[in-house]
Image (cartoon, rainbow, N blue to C red):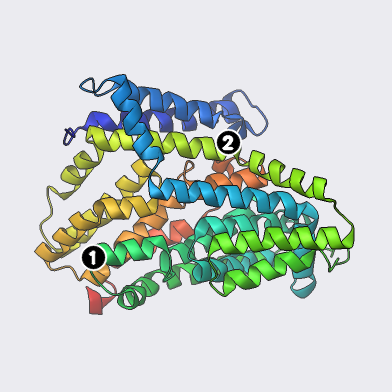
Amino acid sequence: MQKKSNPAALLPIFVFLVLYLGLGLVFEYVLKIPMGFYSIPIVVIFLIALLVACCQNHTLSFDEKLVLMGKGIGDKNIVTMLLIFLAAGMFVGVVGRSSAESVAYFMLSLIPAKFAVAVLFVVSCFVSTAMGTSVGTITLITPIAIPIAAASGYSLPLCIASVMGGAMFGDNLSFISDTTIAATRTQECSMRDKFRVNGLIAVPAAAAVLGLYLLSGAEMPAAAQRQSVEWIPIIPYLAVLVLAVCGVHVTTVLVTGIVLTGAVGLLGGSVGWIEWIGALGEGIAGMGELIVITLLAGGMLEMIRRGGGIDYLIGALTRKVSGKRTAELSIAALVSMANLCTANNTIAIITTGPIARQIADRFGVDRRKSASLLDSFSCFVQGLIPYGAQLMIAAGLASVSPLEIIGYLYYPMALGICSLLAILLRYPRKYS
């Protein structure tokens, strides 16, 4: 029997955040360790948090807790992410840095280097909106952002953050995004109506961030163009980007990229069968830490849910709702806190969506507005948490700490601000 409304069940999340952020600050600013945040053993910290979860809820035996963790690890969303991570690892492994560099120099041959960050942001917005997946977008564009940062003079964390921002834009607005589907189904409204409301909130945020990137680029000295473009390595990457913009499923896109890269390399004589297969294995191995973290997180978060942590949040955040504005604020806080605990915006929406619909109906909140708030605030939180899949995979591909990127995540911050203003200012009026 699930234990209801238990704040102590949230302790593992608290332990993780204190250890992860606390050790990062100590390594970076007290011990003065270079790239101190990147030195934090995040797998070990997740394991400690999981052990804390295992020490709770004494009504369950250890074997029963293992079964519970297995249920969380076997969740459809977790399995889907693992498969995408495996495909992404193979793609990155076989594409290699040279192909990404060729695409980067091709982009820089078309645009001034000082506007490279703005272009990365726009390209990521289009790709993520077409594919409906932020993780897939980050996997495709991050390898391009790395050489662009080196060639343009921008900092690497800023370039990665611009890709992250564009990825979360599409995650929030795309018709085929899991978050859009979950938000509209739980609120029982059409995707088109939700898109209209959501667009009035998300597009101004994206426009403001794009303006910031353009203004900051205008003040930079022009960077010298580096290296000539090699066209053959570009073919697989361009094909992948075209398929992504056309809205092809991310798994199909990645598999196509893997096959094309192998074909181009084998036919051109630049790589043999053994080297190609070895690159596939190396790419998967590079995703090892992220896969382990995802498994640990899935098990820990299911323990928190079973222990009553999510139920406590729902009860605490809906207790004092009295009108439309406070009802919308409670929906925003509800999905945000659930996202902090689950580290998955789709799961957070599915978990809190039915409660949000009841709040909306009781206090006269337009369901199109409640669906938009669920999606916007979940993407706002998901884009900023250092243990979310998006930030971890971006940091892993770029070999930087998630905490180094967070300070440059302008779009998720802007989305959160615009979403909060939409509640406080009763915007858009038609749906408020």
In the image, residue 85 sits, relative to residue 116, either above or below, namely above
Residue designated by label 1: 187
Query: Would residue 232 be found to the left or right of residue 214 on screen?
Result: right
| Residue 376 vs residue 353, the one in the foreground | 353
Query: Residue 430 sits in which quadrant?
Result: bottom left
Of labels 1 and 2, earlier in sequence is: 1
Q: Amino acid at mark 2?
A: Glu
Whole-number angstrom distance, CA of label 1 to CA of label 2: 36 Å
Q: Is residue 406 visible?
A: no
For label 2, the SS is helix
Q: How many marks?
A: 2
Q: Residue at x 81, y 46 (%)?
A: 275
Query: Would residue 87 be found to the left or right of residue 223 on screen?
Result: left
Query: Residue 18 sits in which quadrant?
Result: top left
Residue 354 numbered mark, or none: none
Q: Is residue 30 visible?
A: yes
